[in-house]
Amino acid sequence: MDNLTPKAIVAALDEHIIGQNDAKRAVAVALRNRWRRQRLGPELRDEVTPKNILMIGPTGCGKTEISRRLAKLAEAPFVKVEATKFTEVGYVGRDVEQIARDLAEEAIRLEKERRRDAVREAASKAAMDRLLTALVGDNASEATREAFRERIVDNSMNDTEVEIEVEEAPQMPFDMGNMGGNVGMIDLGDMMGKAFGKKPKKRRKLKVPDAWDKLVDEEAEKRMDQDDVARVALQNAETNGIVFLDEIDKIAVSDVRGGSVSREGVQRDLLPLIEGTTVSTKYGPMKTDHVLFIASGAFHVAKPSDMLPELQGRLPIRVELRALTQEDFVRILKETRANLVDQYKALIGTEDVTLEITEDAIEEVAAIAARVNESVENIGARRLQTVMERLLEEISFEAEEHGGETVTIDAAYVRERLDELAGDTDLSKYIL
Ligand SMILES: Nc1ncnc2c1ncn2[C@@H]1O[C@H](COP(=O)(O)OP(=O)(O)OP(=O)(O)O)[C@@H](O)[C@H]1O
C-alpha cells in the first residue's frame, strides 16, 4: 500500500483502461487519502470521511472497470449494486443495509483467500486422507491407498463417484423470503453449529474432483481461526471497503407512480449508509463511516442536481467520462493488458493453432464496433465483445481440425464476416 501513490495507481489503471484520466485521478486520490488517514492521530482520523465520487458517463466507457481494478489493486473488498434494484416491487426500506452485509461477506472471502496459502499444505494432506478412506475404506493397505492416490493425482479417477461426509447448512425449514433483507444476518447452519458444537454432516455422492475441492475447502476452514477471520475482515470492510452504486441517475428523477417504490425514498434510505451508520451483520456490527462510495450514471435525463441535496453533498467529487471513439477501441484491443485479441489467441492456441490478427483487421473491427454503436445503440466497449465473438465464431468452432496451422485474420476476412451484418441495422440489433 505504501507504494500506491496516486501516480502509481493511475499508471496501474492505465494498463487496463484507455483514457478517462479524470476518473483515474479521482479514484487514485481517494485511495491514497485512505492511506493518509491511517497515518493521522486518532482524533483527526475519525473526523476524516471519504470524499465519495460521482462518475458521469455513458454505458460501457469504463466506470465499473476503473472501480473494480482500483479495488483489486488495493486488495479492498468491493461490491457493485444497481441502485434501481431498490425501486422494485417488494422492496422494504432496510434492504439497503444488505449492501454493507454483502461488503462484509466479500471481506470474509478475501480474508479466507489470503489465509488459505498458509494452511494449503496441511489441508490438502488431510483432504487426501479423507478422500482415500472414502474410496478404499478404513482397512485398505498402505499400498492400495498409495495406488489410489496416484490415480487421483494423475486425473484417472475424474469420472469416478465417491460418497463423502460433508458439512452442510441445513435446508431452511420455512420460507425466509418474506423476512425482507435481514436474512443475511441469520445463518441457520452457523446457529446450529454453535448450538451443537459443530456443523451438521451429510453424506453426499460426488465426482472425485468435486469431492476433493469440497474436502480441501473444509479442511482449510477448520484450520482457520474463524473469529479472527471475522474480526480482521470486518475491520477491512470498514476501512477499505468500496461500494460501486450503479445507475444512481435512475433514482434521481422525481417520483413515478404505480407499483414501483418511490425513488426519492430510495435516496433517503441510502443516505444513512453513505453518511455513516452501523449495520448488524452476522459477523458483528459494521460501521460504514469510512466505506468509499463510487456512484455512477449516464445522467442523460436526470442531472446530478436532481438528487436530494443531502445525497449531492455526500458525492462531492464529480468526474466525467467520455464516450469511447473508434481510436479508443483500437487501443483497447491492442494495448490493454490481457486484451480481447490476446485472449482469443491464447484460447485458440490451446488447440495448437496459431491465430494471427493483422493490424488492419483490428482497425476494421474497431470501425465496425463504432459503426454499430452509432446505428443501433451505444454500448461502448462492450460492443467489442460481441463483434469479436462473431468474428471468431467459425474459427472457434473448427479450431481443433486445424492443429499445427496458422490462421490469419486480415481486414478482408473481417469485412467478409461482418460487413453485411453491421450494415443491416435489424440484423445487428440481434447479433452484434
Ligand atoms: N476505457 C476503457 N478501456 C478499456 N476497456 C474498457 C474501457 N471502457 C470499458 N471497457 C471495457 O468494457 C466493458 C464494460 O465496461 P464497464 O463495465 O466499465 O462499463 P460502465 O462504464 O461501468 O457501464 P455501466 O454503467 O453500463 O455499467 C468492460 O469489459 C471493460 O473492460
Image (spheres, rainbow, N blue to C red):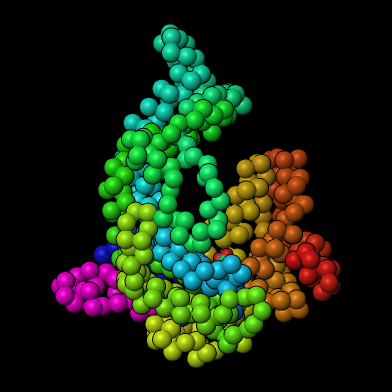
Residue 317 in sight: no
Answer above or below: position of 136 versus 280: above
Nearest to the observer: residue 121 or residue 296: 296
| Percent coordinates x, y for residue 265 in the rendering | 51, 80
For the point 52% across and 69% down, which residue is it? Answer: 92
Answer above or below: position of 85 versus 395: below
Q: Residue furthest front?
A: 174
Residue 33 falls inside the magenta stretch = yes
Q: Residue furthest bottom?
A: 305
User: Considering the image in quadrants, where does the C terminus appear?
Assistant: bottom right
Magenta stretch prevailing secondary structure: helix
Answer above or below: position of 182 versus 123: below
| Percent coordinates x, y for residue 393 in the rendering | 75, 54
For the point 40% across and 40% down, which residue is it? Answer: 192
> Would residue 367 appear left or right of 108 to someone viewing this image?
right
| Percent coordinates x, y for residue 125 in the rendering | 38, 27
Q: Quadrant of ligand 1?
A: bottom right
Residue 202 in sight: yes
Nearest to the observer: residue 314 or residue 209: 314
Nearest to the observer: residue 397 or residue 351: 397
Span highlighted in magenta in the image: 31-52
Residue 330 falls inside the magenta stretch = no
* Total count of labels: 0
> Would residue 155 appear left or right of 144 to someone viewing this image?
right
| Percent coordinates x, y for residue 324 in the rendering | 60, 77
Answer above or below: position of 101 versus 60: above
User: Considering the image in quadrants, where does the N terminus appear?
Assistant: bottom left
> Would residue 228 appear left or right of 186 to someone viewing this image?
left
- Would you identify the image quadrant in which residue 120 lies? top left
For the point 61% across and 69% down, which residue is it? Answer: 89
For the point 45% across and 63% down, which residue is it? Answer: 98
